[in-house]
Image (tube, rainbow, N blue to C red):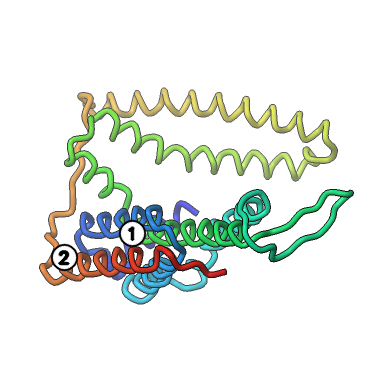
Amino acid sequence: MHDPLDDYAHSNALRDTSPRLKLLLGLGAILLCVASAAPIAPLFIAITISLITLIMAKIPGRFYSTLLLIPFSFSLLSAVVVAFMHGGGDQLFAFNVFGIDLGIREDGANLGLLLIARTFGGMCSLFFIALTTPMIEIFSILKSLGLPDFLVELSMLMYRYIFVFLDQAAMIHNAQVMRLGDAGIKNSLNSFSMLSSVLFLRSWEQGERLIVAMDARCYDGKLDLMEQSGEAEPKAIFAMMGYMVVIAAIAVLTREIQLL
């Protein structure tokens, strides 16, 4: 998943747009999703941000829908649990399991829908940032905002090597599966322990190689980051501000509206 995300972040139609503006748009939409008291505003954010990502950034719809299946699955499961465990009002659905009455009431159902809407809107905003802005530009913005250098550089290294070690873990796991290492619980536990130990040793070796490589390149404790120099156009700034005002107005005007 890491390679397609980086490829689209470097080749999308909004690549030359100011990264600060894109980051501000995505983070602002996420905050408004979280602060919304009703699901209307988060759903509006999810729809509009998705259209921006698909039409303006020209991200393939099939790839984008595959990404959205991940948050939708866990948000749906969480919403079902929340709907059964919370809320009052009229009962919408009920059944009996082993003598225990389980049911969904209006408040619980509305809370579950709000959870789904917030998650969906927030993840669409987060995917907008990930698919239109390369991570190196995000790190450079964080550094320019005054975050400590060691924190930004450590985050860069962690981001890079998370995917390196995931690839290594996938290769080792595939080799174990081909040798029937997952046949039975005992073999699966043994294979998992071997995978963990080998991955730990390889991560240690990779860290030592990284130190040697950085010393060979005269590393002095700082990594130079180059931020994209393009400035945001006034019309783009006004469009983003207008979009935020519209979302905030929708969130305020619909705060008392419930879908059920």
Q: Nearer the viewer, residue 217 or 140?
A: 140
Image coordinates for residue 70, horizontal then vertical, percent:
56, 57
Q: Amino acid at mark 1?
A: Ala
**Residue at horizontal 40%, vertical 70%?**
44
Q: Examine the rendered structure and indicate whether residue 140 appears above or below residue 132.
A: above
Q: Secondary structure at mark 2?
A: helix
Q: Mark 2 touching mark 1, by CB under 8 A?
A: no
Image coordinates for residue 36, horizontal then vertical, percent:
39, 58
In the drawing, does residue 76 fall left or right of residue 135?
right
Q: Nearer the viewer, residue 90 or 131?
A: 90
Q: Amino acid at mark 2?
A: Ile
Q: Hey, which quadrant is residue 103 in on the image?
A: bottom right
Q: Nearer the viewer, residue 175 or 67?
A: 67
**Residue at horizontal 73%, vertical 32%?**
191
Image disc number at residue 29: 1
Q: Which residue is mark 2?
A: 237
- Crowdedness of circle 2 by 10 Å Cα count: few (<14), some, many (20+)? some
Q: Examine the rendered structure and indicate whether residue 211 appears above or below residue 73.
A: above
In the drawing, does residue 160 fall left or right of residue 141?
right
**Residue at horizontal 48%, vertical 24%?**
205
- Crowdedness of circle 1 by 10 Å Cα count: few (<14), some, many (20+)? many
Distance from the alpha carbon under mark 2 to that under mark 1: 15 Å
Tell which circle, 2 or 1, labels the residue nearer the N-terminal end.
Answer: 1
